[in-house]
């Protein structure tokens, strides 16, 4: 019998790509999502790409009794928990919304898993837990810095909850994956990132500017102590990132994890500047992106990129798609969404 995985938040950007890769790897998938920041197009895209009529349940993970029904209905032994709010700025102005939602939903996942006897969980963490790191690249042992947003704090707290729960009870194993900057889209251009309102992240702003939806991209700061003055990030292709979830689940399913709780960086290992990304995007896609230099954005770290040795060696995973391929896929997706030829 095939192993089944519950993907909470599976209608969203990273969740939908992960559902595809799980199915490609031979897993059965059930998607649960409250559609608060996604619509059914992600699930439809997964069905189209895989040819599998993936079951979907509209449910809020914060509603424990409704969520319990999903556990009763489907016999998954593993959960990948994406469902969470993720807007850094909003979390600063409305912290209660973030603490209530992101902590409650994860506590419900863990409680229900234990009550219903399910074993493996992957938590969507973030490089944001490192803050302005003292050493680069960051390894999993690089100390976390106090969070500068409530969003970032929920990532740290959920990591700690998972560590303690997996370590204390012996009935559940967990892996936190610390994503660097996920970008790009599935090569089919059937799923991708579809932010509501004005994009807060770089690549969706770039693609929307190229598509003529935004007038001008602001490059936030060009006087940072970096080679070209703009910030450095580790941009990880979303399909590569999705595959990291598959190997993390498989590691636990096969009992190959070395500790009940483990943490892995998921990045490329390369620091790329905002200006480099922008010029690569223009070059590979043959489009111009109207942009200007703007003041630094409060809260931005100067530079961060991953040491991926642990994921390479322990998970046998590494990023495969090049930045050029990824930026091409981001543009193909934007064009598909906007009906641009
Ligand atoms: C990348 C670089 C900006 C927009 C955030 C969260 C993180 C994770 C991913 C998600 C920075 C610059 C951006 C623009 C720009 N969370 N930039 N003009 O801030 O590294 O990470 O998103 O759900 O937790 O903190 O990503 O894409 O916003 O910015 O110049 O219009 O692009 O200053 O250097 P960030 P980002």
Image (cartoon, rainbow, N blue to C red):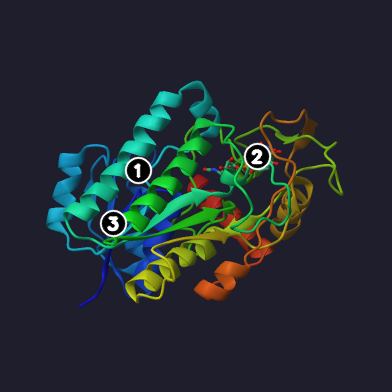
**For the residues bearing labels 3 and 2, Cβ distance under 8 angstroms:** no
Q: Quadrant of residue 21?
A: bottom left
Using residue 151 as the reference point, say whether residue 279 is left or right of it.
right
Query: Which disc number belongs to residue 169?
Result: 3
Label placed on residue 193? none
Per the model, the C-alpha gap separating discs 2 and 1 is 23 Å
Where is residue 274? Give x, y as percent: 74, 46
Q: Cα distance, mark 1 to mark 3? A: 37 Å
Q: Earlier in the sequence, mark 2 or mark 1?
A: 1
Q: Is residue 334 visible?
A: yes
For residue 3, what is the image quadrant?
A: bottom left
Between residues 71 and 175, which one lies in front from this camera angle?
175
Residue bearing mark 1: 39
Residue at image mark 2: 209
Residue 236 is situated, as x and y percent measured from the top left of the image, at 60, 58
* 268 left or right of 46 in image: right
Crowding at label 1, few (<14), some or many (≥20) Cα neighbours within 10 Å?
some
């Amino acid at each position: 019998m095939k192993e089944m995985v519950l993907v909470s938040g599976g209608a969203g950007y990273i969740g939908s790509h992960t559902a595809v890769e799980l199915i490609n790897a031979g897993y059965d998938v059930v998607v649960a999502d409250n559609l608060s920041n996604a619509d059914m197009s992600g699930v439809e895209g997964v069905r189209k790409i895989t040819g599998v009529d993936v079951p979907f349940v509209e449910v809020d993970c914060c509603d424990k009794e409704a969520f319990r029904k999903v556990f009763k209905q489907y016999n998954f032994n593993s959960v990948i928990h994406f469902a969470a709010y993720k807007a850094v700025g909003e979390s600063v102005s409305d912290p209660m919304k973030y603490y209530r939602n992101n902590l409650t939903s994860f506590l419900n996942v863990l409680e229900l898993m234990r009550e219903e006897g399910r074993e493996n969980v992957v938590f969507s963490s973030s490089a944001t837990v490192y803050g302005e790191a003292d050493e680069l690249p960051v390894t999993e042992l690089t100390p976390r810095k106090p969070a500068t947003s409530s969003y970032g704090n929920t990532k740290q707290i959920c990591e700690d909850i998972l560590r303690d729960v997996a370590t204390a009870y012996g009935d559940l194993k967990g892996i936190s994956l610390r994503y660097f900057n996920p970008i790009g889209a599935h090569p089919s251009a059937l799923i991708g990132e579809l932010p509501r309102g004005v994009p807060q992240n770089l690549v969706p702003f770039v693609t929307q500017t190229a598509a003529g939806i935004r007038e001008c991209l602001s490059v936030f700061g060009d006087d940072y102590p970096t080679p070209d003055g703009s910030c450095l990030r580790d941009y990880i292709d979303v399909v590569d990132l999705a595959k990291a979830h598959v190997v993390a689940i498989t590691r636990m399913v096969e009992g190959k994890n070395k500790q009940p709780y483990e943490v892995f960086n998921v990045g490329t290992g390369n620091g790329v500047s905002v200006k480099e990304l922008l010029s690569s995007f223009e070059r590979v896609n043959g489009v111009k992106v109207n942009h200007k230099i703007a003041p630094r954005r409060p809260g931005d770290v100067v530079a961060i990129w991953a040491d991926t040795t642990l994921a390479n060696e322990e998970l046998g995973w590494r990023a495969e798609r090049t930045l050029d391929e990824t930026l091409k896929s981001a543009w193909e997706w934007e064009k598909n969404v906007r009906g641009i030829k």
